[in-house]
Amino acid sequence: MEPILFAVLAAVALVAAVATIAWRNPLRSAFSLIVCLFALAGMFVTLFAHFLAAMQILVYAGAIMVLFVFVIMLLDLSGHGSELKLRILPVLGSLAVLAVAGKFAKTVLSTHPLVTDVPPAVPDSFGTVPGVAELLLGQFLLPFELVSLLLLVAVVGAVVVARRRFWREGK
Amino acid sequence: MEPKLFAAIPVIILLPAIGGKRWGDRFAAVVTNAAVFSSFGVSLYAWWYLRNDVEGMVYLYKLYPFLKTDLLNIGLDFRFDRLSAVMCLVVTGVSSLIHLYSTGYMKGDRSYARFFSHLNMFVFFMLLLVLGANLVVMFAGWEGVGLSSYLLIGFWYEDMEKAVAGKKAFVVNRIGDFGFLLGMLMLLMYNHGSVDFFALERFANSGMPPVANELNMTVICLLLFLGAVGKSAQIPLYVWLPDAMAGPTPVSALIHAATMVTAGVYMVARLSFLFVHAPIAMAVVAGVGATTALFAATIGLAQTDIKKVLAYSTVSLFGYMFLAVGAGAFASGMFHLTTHAFFKACLFLGAGSVIHALHHQQDIRRMGGLARKMPVTHITFLISTLAIAGIPPLSGFFSKDEILTSAFLASTPFPTAFKVFWAFGAAGAFLTAFYMMRLYWLTFRGTPRDAHAHEHAHESPWSMGTALVLLAAAATVAGVLGLPGEGHLFSKWLAPVVGKYTLEPHHASHLLHWALIGLSVAIGAAGLIAGWLIYRSGPDGVAARIAASTGPMYRLVAGKYFIDELYGLIVVRPLKAVAAFSYKVVDKIFIDLLGVNVPAWAVKGIGVLPRMFHDGNLRTYMLAVVVGVLCLWVVL
Amino acid sequence: MMSATPLSWYLLLSFAIFSIGLLGLLIRRNLVVMLMAMELMLNGANLALVAYARFRGDEAGQVMAFFVMALAAAEAAIGLALVLAIYKHFKTLDVDRISRLNG
């Protein structure tokens, strides 16, 4: 049952990922990305990361992608077509990416068994809110606080940068 | 000692340095004039103070040690003694009058303020030169006046000819300065890194080996004299001075007659303690002076440019001064320098007044009959002409006669040579009187040869007139400073400085003395009368007939013996060839090509590849990052 | 209980998504799409982290993934703010035309 679930989710995620970078219309890309994120959230569930799966949907698919969609609609970029002209740069880029992917695959296949790999048994609380919270507010308290600080800085920075006057003066 | 005086010496130097354009022409004129006049005032005060002090007192002011090492000990020191006092008074006095004169002469010039600031810069450096307590400070002033001279000769630099004249003066002076520098370096070497005048005097009188070796002293003195030859325009480096007349006339009067060119004579007098130890060098000094005196006077005979005549006259009269110092009569040389400063400045300013009135006409053949139009200029010019010709009781008579007497009676190992020098000097004196009379007559008397210009001629404004009158007055009465015999105030004044080194002339009977005096008066008068006889009828009468009958000789003189052309052939042409070689081969191939362009091309070639990645496109950069990661991955 | 899919599959999928994101970053010229491609890359990395957490029985991997999400949020906020500003300035989001830094 589980491998079937994995296969389905993986297929959805891959197709959605390819669609994300392939659509000419950025709005379609954004929706494809949301699909991909949902598929990954499902995969998190099969990996006993319930809390993270919820976060993935709430924060990522919910908040971040809404931001993306807002910006795309605001700037009215839909239909700005005629991208992806086959020039030397994309070809070189594809080759480089292919090399990276090949290298990845080779490494994985040479170090991990492809068929028999049984994950260890884990307690029931694994990946639930209490389980993750134990670590997050215990061992990783300092990074946690730092990340919250980072988010604050990012928000302030975003407000400053996006303000009209900033760029007028910067010119 | 009065501390105030110590403070005053740098003030003398710094005051004229104030100038500038910021607040307009009028302001510039007022400031620069005030600066020079007040420095004249300070000089007078300092002189008065020195006069009332112990005889032979020397005021030293050590500003700060300039170079102080084990090998060198040179300070930015100033020295005010009786010799510097004379020079200070002459320099600031004459420049005050010339500044005043310039306010009128330069009126309306586009670069009025620039003129005055350059003029003040000149006075600053000249005072540095005369007040320096060692050769290095003196040399700094020496170079500084050369720079000012260059700037002022080429003052109207849009005119190529004038710019070239400035360049010529600068380059010719470099040759002399080279000698000065070498002489100074030799002294530094022998005198343990000090060229302070006190130290040098002690060193020269010590009789230690380098001094005792006459050859060394002769070489040093001749090198230093080469510097003097350049600055004071003597043979063979006199060629720049006539060309320097391209500058504004007040500049010619101040720099190229009254002050800067005196630097050479001042230097020999200042270093009298060195020169007395080198009789051969002294004879050379006198010889060069006497030859120049005669040679330049002959050229002066045939010049038609009013300023050129005066320029050759200046060269000639500086020859007399060198004849005097070469004969060991340092005070006489300085005395002639002083009187010459007055009457020659007056002559130049008079010439400037004429040029001003005739709207920049400088050719004496186009003048004539100006006496009635310009009475002040005429009278002052006449007085100065008589002074320069040596007619008693004007100042030129006393100083020139003294020089000829001391040359005739010089106590030297080469008495015959000095007799010849005397003869040169006497002949030069005749010619001087002759060409000055010619100049005077063609300019002011006779019939006007350019009716139009004569019609519009007018007397110059009060500022110029005042300067002329004061200078003429000084030229008239300065002689009382040098009455022959016991009454010679000038040599008494200088006795503490140069008295010890003055070579006592051979004793001569009163009769001989009076005979020599009478002779020089007769020579001067004869020159004047001959000039009057020939030029009374204007340039086309008797004069033209004489010129025609002497043919080639006249052309030789009128062409200034073609010395410029000769130098062009033997010095300038080879130098140009060398310069062309170094430009075309050394510069173009070795420096430009191999030294600069080839490495640049190499770097540019290497840069082609990396430049491709810096096209400003974000994606290119990212691709580079990915490739870089890949490479690292492969390597690790 | 039922995890029978080996770790290597998860990793391969994770790398595939990462590579697709990287490819998108390299070949697209639209800044917004490039930002989305970066989100893809981050998610690929997240998947690997979560898979490792499961197969090692260590929740620390999930905490890391959580941090990555927070980071992604910050990055999106700043990135989109910049996109807005750039669009106002250049009137385009085509990075090929925003190449003032030209050597």
Image: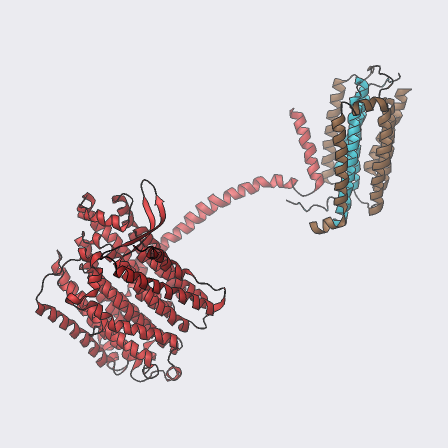
The colour of chain A is brown
Q: Is residue B259 above or below residue A16?
A: below
Instruction: Look at chain B in the picture and name its colour.
Output: red
The residue at 48%/64% (across/down) is B21
Image quadrant holding the N terminus of chain B, namely bottom left
Q: In the rendered image, which quarter is residue A152 located in? A: top right
Relative to residue A120, is residue B437 depicted above or below? below
Quarter in which the C terminus of chain B is drawn: top right
Instruction: Tell me if B358 is positioned left or right of A115 in this view.
Output: left
- Could you tell me which residue is drawn at 22 percent across and 48 percent down? B202
Q: Nearer the viewer, residue B97 or B53?
A: B53
Using the rendered image of the protein, determine whether residue B414 is visible from the camera's viewpoint: yes
Q: Which chain is cyan?
A: C
Colour approach in the figure: by chain
Give coordinates of residue C54: x percent, y percent.
Answer: 82, 20
Q: Residue at x 66, y 28 (%)?
A: B632
As drawn, the residue found furthest toward the front would be B2
Pick the front one: B96 or A41: B96
Q: Nearer the viewer, residue B181 or B275?
A: B275
The answer to which quarter of the image holds residue B93 is bottom left
- Position of residue B320 in the picture relative to residue C34 (left or right): left
